[in-house]
Image (cartoon, rainbow, N blue to C red):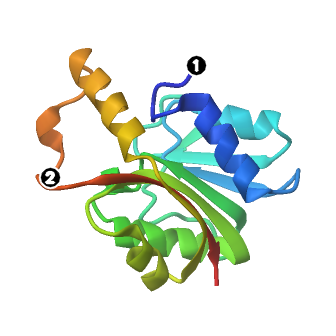
Amino acid sequence: MMNGHPGGEAHTLRMLELAELPRGARVLDMGAGAGEALRLLREGGFDAAGVDLSPRGEGVEQGDFLHLSFPDGSFDAVLSQCALFASGDQPGALRESHRLLRPGGQLLLSDVFFEAPLPLLKAAGFTVLHREDLTPQWREYYLEALWREETDCCALPKGKCGYWLLIAERR
C-alpha cells in the first residue's frame, strides 16, 4: 500500500480511470519516489518511465523534473502526485510537463497549491478537463503524518492551501 500521497494506490488508479488513457500509452511519473505508481502503470499495460530527485525504487531514474533530458513531446501523459509543489517551482514544473507532452497529451496531477491552480495550468498551456478539491483528505493525511512524526510541519509556507486532483490537456 502506498503512503506517499493521500489516497495511495486507489487514488492513482482513479486518476488513470479519469484520464481514460489507452493501454500502451507512454506515461512519465514525475516525482516517482519509491516507484509505486510506476509499478501500477506498468502492470496496467502502459509504457512508463519514472523520475525523482532522490529515487528510492526499482526503475525510478534520478532527474530534476524542472529540467529533464527527454525530447519535446515524448509522452502521452505525465502523472505527478504530491511532487510539483516540492520542486519549489510549480509554474516551472508545469511548463516542463507541457514541453514533455505531445499535443493533446494529458497531465494527471494531484498536489498542494498555495494559490489557485487553474490560472497556473492555463498559463502553462493546459486546458483543465477535470478538477476536484480534495483538501479535507489532504488535511487528514498530513495530520496523520505529523502524528507519526513522518513530516515537518514547518516545511510548508504559511497561509491557506488546498489539495487538488486535476486532469488537464496540453493545448
- Residue 130 visible in the shown view: yes
Residue in front for this viewpoint, 7 or 3: 7
Question: Where does the C terminus fall, quadrant-wise?
Answer: bottom right
Element class at badge 1: loop
- Residue 61 versus residue 126 in the image, above or below: above
Q: Position of residue 77 (x, y in %)?
A: 69, 61
Residue that label 1 marks: 1
Residue 167 falls in which quadrant of the image?
bottom right
Q: Position of residue 115 (x, y in %)?
A: 28, 67
Task: Say few, some or many: other residues with alpha carbon within 10 Å of mark 2 (under 14 / 14 to 19 / 20 or more).
Answer: few
Residue that label 2 marks: 157
Report the side of 94 relative to 17 (left or right): left
Report the side of 64 relative to 16 (left or right): left
- Residue 28 versus residue 107 in the image, above or below: above
- Residue 59 visible in the shown view: no
- Residue 59 versus residue 125 in the image, above or below: above
> Which of the two labelled residues, at mark 1 and mark 2, occupies the earlier sequence position?
1
Residue at x 31% of width, y 37% of height: 139
Query: Seen from this angle, which residue lies furthest top?
Result: 148
Task: Say few, some or many: other residues with alpha carbon within 10 Å of mark 1 (under 14 / 14 to 19 / 20 or more).
Answer: few
Q: How many marks?
A: 2
Question: Where does the N terminus fall, quadrant-wise?
Answer: top right
Q: Position of residue 144 (x, y in %)?
A: 30, 22
Residue in front for this viewpoint, 132 or 119: 132
Q: Amino acid at mark 1?
A: Met
Q: Which mark is residue 43?
A: none
How far apart in space, not on screen, are marks 1 and 2 (Cα)? 29 Å
Q: Amino acid at mark 2?
A: Pro
Residue at x 42% of width, y 51% of height: 111
Is the Cβ of the residue at disc 1 closer than 8 Å to that at disc 2?
Answer: no
Residue at x 65% of width, y 71% of height: 101
Residue at x 70% of width, y 68% of height: 74
